[in-house]
Image: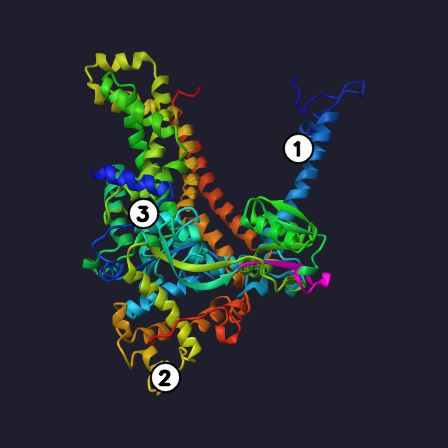
Amino acid sequence: MTIGDNQTPMMNGAYLGSGDLPQRPPPVMSRGAIAWVRENLFSSIPNTIMTLLGIWILWQIVPPTLDFLIFDAVWDGTGRDACLESVRKAPVGACWAFAKVRLGYFFYGQYPIDERWRVDTVWVMGAIGVIWLLWPRVPYKNWGSLYFFLIFPVIAFFLLVGTPTFGLQKVPTNLWGGVLVTLVLSTVGIVFSLPLGVLLALGRRSQLPLIRLFAVIFIEFVRGVPLITVLFMANVMLPLFLPDGWRPDSLLRVLVGIALFAAAYMAEVVRGGLQAIGRGQYEGAQSLGLGYWQMMVLIILPQALKIVIPNIVNTFIGLFKDTTLVSIVGIFDFLKTIEASFVDPRWATPVTRATGYAFAAIFYFIFCWGMSQYSQWMERKLATGHKR
Amino acid sequence: MNIFLKAAAFGAAALGLSVTAASAQGVLQKTKDRGQVVCGTGLGIAGFGMPDEKGVWKGIDIDYCRAIAAAIFNDPMKVKTVSLTAKDRFTALQSGEIDVLVRTTTWTMSRDTSLGLNFAGINYYDGQGFMVRKSMNIKSALELNGASVCTQQGTTTELNLADYFRANKMKYEVVAFVTNDETIKAYEAGRCDVFTTDASGLFAERLKFQKPDDHMILPEIISKEPLAASVRHGDDQWFDLVKWVHFAMLNAEELGVTQANVDQMLKSDNPEIKRLLGTEGKFGEMIGVPNDWVVRIVKHVGNYGEVFERNVGMGSPLKIERGKNNLWTKGGLQYAPPIR
């Protein structure tokens, strides 16, 4: 006789069931959301206290933040009256009207309005390049790198700077500003710092004393001074040393400074990866008859770089935010354009400043979080038995 | 050898000694070749120099530059602005990165002499002032005995304050903060009765309050802050030009020449107006620009009064009264030598 078989004959004692009881769900307290809450949030007295405390803190922070950012925010207006509590007779949150009016300035700085399509074109081209390279499903990666590292920079340069021969009016870099400058600085910094950093890291582990010495001096010297010092040096002191009339563009000076600075940090990150690769990998490569560059490019670096992805992205995120430092040498990056807008008396209100900084925070968060998410996804994808 | 010279020059600059940019070519000629006047400006000061929504710089300082460009090129937009921090501004001028510095810079003796600058027109007479709540019912700074005063730490503001109260035998209590923002917040929150900083700054800060109309700025100005344009030592032709652009704008206001009526004024019989607008005499040539230089300035930028009203005066949200910046004929300090 098998249980679950409804053919069970009736016996004398009527206590024997004639079939299975219907299946019932587990008790309410041990399943689903309630159980999860009980087990995770209220399992003990300290846990309960911490939970209540957490809820209280969230209650203190989240509703006012949402009120400020969304519910009480002012979305439309033409001047400070729109964002004044005394005029509106209602609580005033973020003055997004201010950000809206200033949006063009935040994104392009003083770039002439009629020429801003050039910046837009560069952004679209850059986005295509980034997606091509970073999204694994898109084919022809070789063409992608050729496009992003050679064709795109050349076109971008001629578009942004302007070439009178093609009928594009020249736009000097002192007119550049806002998101444009932030993206130019960080893209150039990121794109140059990685290969430079790899070279410096290899140089530091080189057998050739001269190369090693150069790499060590460069890395230690650059890491030994704050970025602000480098920027000041580039901006204030360089013009005093150089002959009259031979004065590199101030944005270019800062770009070079940032790229070299980031390269020194990147070198140490990459060196960490190189040191994590076992000696056997080197010996194995050598026993196959590979030369130094073949060994590095085909065997060592792919493994080493994979290990240090989190650190590389960490450096990139740091670099992206460090670009805000250029404002101290008078270059109007995204944050500085926002700050410069605070002084506008037509929009001077108690909430203008908070609105500007909230806008900046959202912008920087989206970029940094995006980079971080991409790197984590890439790590999972590349975790071929190397996960530690 | 050259490197040594440069190093020596830098050393001298670092020590605050005078550096003379020994250049064979004058700044005016260089400016003409370049097709642009390079102006040193700030990072954004309300009414004096700040970018508007379109990214175009506006302000009383910027208009000074635009007037120079108008006189030279007949185009006020031929100005390149270089934004400078307070620390960078003198180096930028000494190194020749900018042609003229118009950045709310106070004319002081040490800057005029040992820093190697020449100060041209004073385009704004500023000075330290006081802001109080209207509810305090005070009409003069001399009634501030026993008041608590919010101010920024380590500035000349704090020293001027001490001098003023001591000279007038009044007691006061200082509540000092590190940044300007903290100071203004504390004042608004009621931590002190009085807020003090440069008067032009008081007007700009007042707009950021919840209720700006509850506060008033007292008439007393307790320090001298003549804000002027400056150029490098050693190029008198350029110095003259920068100086006379300001004087021309003042003379235009004094003679009633405005942006609107400048074309009719060209037909005026008044000899002073004739000399000003270049229908008589060759005054433009004396500073190396065409003789209709003032017509260009007034047409494109306006006279001094128009520039003032538009940027900081009643035509702007700042609503600063002319006060000391009025013409000498109307009880102010703005006085220009005659063009003759």
- The numbered dot on residue A32 is 1
Q: Quadrant of the N terminus of chain B?
A: top left
Badge nearest the viewer, 2 or 3 = 3
Q: Is residue A273 above or below residue B6?
A: above
Looking at the rendering, the stretch of residues picked out in magenta corresponds to B127-141
Give how far across and how far down residue A151 sits, in percent.
Answer: 23, 45
Is residue B132 within the magenta segment?
A: yes
Would you identify the image quadrant in which residue B215 lies? bottom right
**Chain holding disc 2:** B
Mark nearer the viewer, 1 or 2: 2
Image quarter of residue A39? top right
Residue at image location 53% in from the left, 73% down from the top = B331
Q: Chain of mark 3?
A: B
Q: Residues within 10 Å of mark 3 (few under 14, many from 20)?
A: many
Q: Secondary structure at mark 2?
A: helix
Q: Is residue B18 left or right of residue B216?
A: left
**Label for residue A140?**
none
> Residue at 30% of width from left, 21% of height from top?
A204
Q: List the residue tagged with mark 3.
A: B19
Question: In what element is the residue under mark 1?
Answer: helix
Residue A243 image position (x, y, % from top left): 23, 45
Query: What is the three-letter code of the residue carrying label 3?
Result: Val
Q: Residues within 10 Å of mark 2 (few under 14, many from 20)?
A: some
